[in-house]
């Protein structure tokens, strides 16, 4: 499976990237960074740090949009820490960003690879994907699928009462992506709030003897403290790697095809994902919206694939 991960790392983004890098079924064509959890300078740095922790300095990383399409940037250092990857000791990555802009890389890749062979995995705000669609509308018909983490319906929001962070940061970009006509798989909070980093699950990752797993353990111990206090749970939700897990084992998930529209005008519900779960409108279905997950199966997959990463250093 050829994929591009579009990301704003983020500890849970790191788990998604590591899961992809540890999975031989996946060919990661490149990583595109976008401003989101922290500003672009840090997300582009963090993506390279994660690759280096995983022993994969061969992965090409591209910097993209440093702000939403038409709004000021909202970030989430209160969740992810000032670096975005608080937890382990960080370092300056040993390899450089690519010179090409992330949006150009997305467009050029989709136009040069055979149609229907490249999947986009956006796990941050959808700004880069929207800009690519604006720059070259023909890519919409060439995307195999867009498997994204964002939104919520039954779980509502995590940054406002009705909006999930990735959609809230750039709702105009999300509206453009959901209207583009490409096949979309939506991994909302309804799923991600069911994959919790419990003590026993982190302990299993802690036992893996490689650099990536040790760093992931430290990231998760930092990351979960915010959501444990917020939700009163044993562990926090591990949002972003559910996208990669769906590519690897879709049988772990269940949901249904729905129409999804994005609220862009209301001050009260900006960024809400309006999911027609019950089919009460005649609006066309434009996304597979997932709702349930085998959480133990998910963590079994993540733990097993982390063992494939890097040297024991």
Image: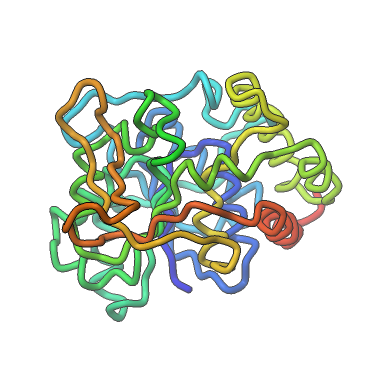
Q: Position of residue 73 (x, y in %)?
A: 29, 25
152 relative position to 254: left or right: left
Viewer-nearest residue: 162 or 35: 162
> Is residue 49 visible to the viewer in this orientation of the structure?
no
28 relative position to 146: left or right: right
24 relative position to 289: left or right: right
Residue lying at 18% horizontally and 34% vertically, measured from the top left: 264
Residue extending furthest toward the bottom: 114
Q: Position of residue 286 (x, y in %)?
A: 26, 60
> Is residue 100 visible to the viewer in this orientation of the structure?
yes
Viewer-nearest residue: 142 or 28: 142
Q: Position of residue 15 (x, y in %)?
A: 60, 47
On screen, residue 110 above or below 223? below
On screen, residue 134 above or below 226? below
Viewer-nearest residue: 283 or 85: 283
Residue lying at 30% horizontally and 53% vertically, measured from the top left: 100
On screen, residue 170 above or below 205? above
Residue lying at 84% horizontally and 50% vertically, measured from the top left: 209
Residue lying at 53% horizontally and 62% vertically, measured from the top left: 246
The picture quadrant where one finds residue 157 is: top left
């Amino acid at each position: 499976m050829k994929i591009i991960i579009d990301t704003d790392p983020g500890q849970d983004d790191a788990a998604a990237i590591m899961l992809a890098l540890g999975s031989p079924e996946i060919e990661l064509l490149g990583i595109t960074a976008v401003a989101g959890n922290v500003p672009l300078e840090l997300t582009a740095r963090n993506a390279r740090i994660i690759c280096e922790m995983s022993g994969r300095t061969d992965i090409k990383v591209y910097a993209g949009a440093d702000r939403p399409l038409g709004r000021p940037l909202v970030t989430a250092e209160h969740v992810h820490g000032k670096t975005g990857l608080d937890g382990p000791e960080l370092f300056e990555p040993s390899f450089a960003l690519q010179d090409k802009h992330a949006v150009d890389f997305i467009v050029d890749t989709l136009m040069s690879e055979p149609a229907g062979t490249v999947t986009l995995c956006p796990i941050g705000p959808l700004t880069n994907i929207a800009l690519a669609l604006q720059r070259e509308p023909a890519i919409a018909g060439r995307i195999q699928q867009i498997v994204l983490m964002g939104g919520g319906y039954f779980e509502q929001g995590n940054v406002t009462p009705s909006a999930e962070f990735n959609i809230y940061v750039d709702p105009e970009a999300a509206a453009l992506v959901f209207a583009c006509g490409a096949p979309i798989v939506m991994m909302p909070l309804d799923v991600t709030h069911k994959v919790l980093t419990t003590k026993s699950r982190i302990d299993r990752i802690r036992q893996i003897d490689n650099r990536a797993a040790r760093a992931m353990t430290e990231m998760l111990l930092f990351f979960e403290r915010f959501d444990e206090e917020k939700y009163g749970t044993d562990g926090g939700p591990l949002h972003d790697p559910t996208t990669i897990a769906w590519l690897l084992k879709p049988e772990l998930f269940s949901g249904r095809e729905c129409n999804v529209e994005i609220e862009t005008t209301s001050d009260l519900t900006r960024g809400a994902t309006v999911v027609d779960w019950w089919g009460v409108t005649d609006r066309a279905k434009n996304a597979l919206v997932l709702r349930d997950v085998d959480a133990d199966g998910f963590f079994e997959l993540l733990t097993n694939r982390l063992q494939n990463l890097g040297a024991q250093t």
